[in-house]
Image: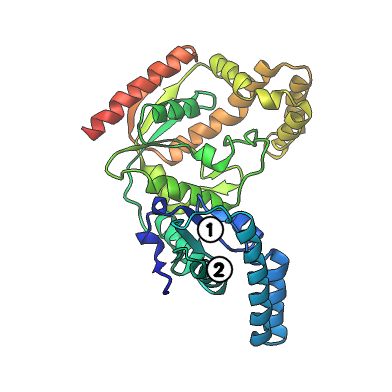
Amino acid sequence: MQIPKLHFKDLELHHFDSVIDVRSPSEFAEDHILGSINLPVLSDSERILVGTTYKQESRFKARKIGAALIAKNSAQYLETELFEKERDWRPLIYCWRGGQRSSSFATILSEIGWRPSLVDGGYKNYRNDVTQLLHKTKPPYQFILISGHTGTAKTEIVNILNEFSLQTIDLEGLANHRGSVFGATATKQSSQKLFESRLFTRLQSLDPRKPIILESESNKIGQLAIPSMIWNIMKLSPRIEVNAPLNERAKYLTTTYADLIGDKAQLSQRIEFLTHQHGHKKVCEWKNLAKESKFHALAKELMFVHYDSRYQNSQQRHPSKTLLTLELSQITKENILKAAKKIKDLANSFIS
């Protein structure tokens, strides 16, 4: 039985019962097709062994070792993860280039009676599609940016708009970072490639004929860079500006960053990162405010001295049309919801 090979561009992943990545755990951790599971037919050490044998001894010996290891590991999955699969189970399988690992595993499954398919060209062709959309061609999307100084509840507004069934992208959520020197979360950021896979998958789910709302960001979110073509569109996209008094923004931030405030050692370490920009004296003042639990005063200082000027400079470097300006005299749940509803009405006017 010939196993079908399908190009990623032509795939509807939901038509398959499982998407299986048979690459090694480290390859999978760096990046993968979202929604796939990892059933490595060669572990990281086994893959190194086969590659070393191929280079230093012979291709034939490497293939023998590889085949034996793939058969052994495949048998283990047939006795565990795959044992309860029914006869009509339809898996999609891929490896690095659609070569030996995925073909061998698919052949074993097909001999049992299942109907596997392969991603033609494997992960490499999938990654080419991601790179094409995010780095090489201008994507056919229209963005509206929610912009404003630090602490104006922009992320919360974007999340509410998503609940309103508008098209949104939460870049900070995809990057697992809140977008500032204080924005790291308890879990480590993913690789750049996996971040791009998340963004690619989100964009593929959206209608390019309708506006997509996202928060204005700098070109990096933590350690991850916004892909070049997406960043180019963002720089030219129209904006909705959200304004709020400094005191209100400070109050909001002390709530939003409650996890960081609860760890004074971590907070002090983050403040230390600003030394090269503001000097030891100013950083020492900020660290003392943190030590004395004067978080509201600290938030006001950081925004007034550090963040607000940088926001103004960014606006001057990348000027664009302002569609709407929203004034939040107080940053409350009610006012945030009202702002989101006004943005919803504006976005719907683009659709109609």
Q: Where is residue 326 in the image (x, y as percent from the top left)?
A: 39, 20
Q: Please, which colouring scheme is shown? A: rainbow
Q: Position of residue 352 (x, y in %)?
A: 20, 32
Numbered circle sitting on residue 20: 1
Which image quadrant is residue 25 in? Answer: bottom right
Q: Which amino acid does label 2 sit on?
A: Phe
Q: Where is residue 4 in the image (x, y as percent from the top left)?
A: 40, 69
Horizontal relation, residue 287 to residue 350: left or right: right
Residue occupying the point 54% across, 49% down? 195
Q: Is residue 349 above or below residue 77?
A: above
Residue occupying the point 46% across, 66% down? 118
Which image quadrant is residue 41 in? Answer: bottom right
Question: Which residue was labeled with disc 2?
Answer: 105
Disc 1 + disc 2, Cβ < 8 Å? yes
Q: Position of residue 165 (x, y in %)?
A: 36, 30
Q: Judge by depth and name the residue closer to the eye, 187 or 260.
A: 187
Q: Which amino acid does label 1 sit on?
A: Ile
Secondary element type, mark 2: helix
Secondary element type, mark 1: strand
Residue occupying the point 54% across, 70% down? 108
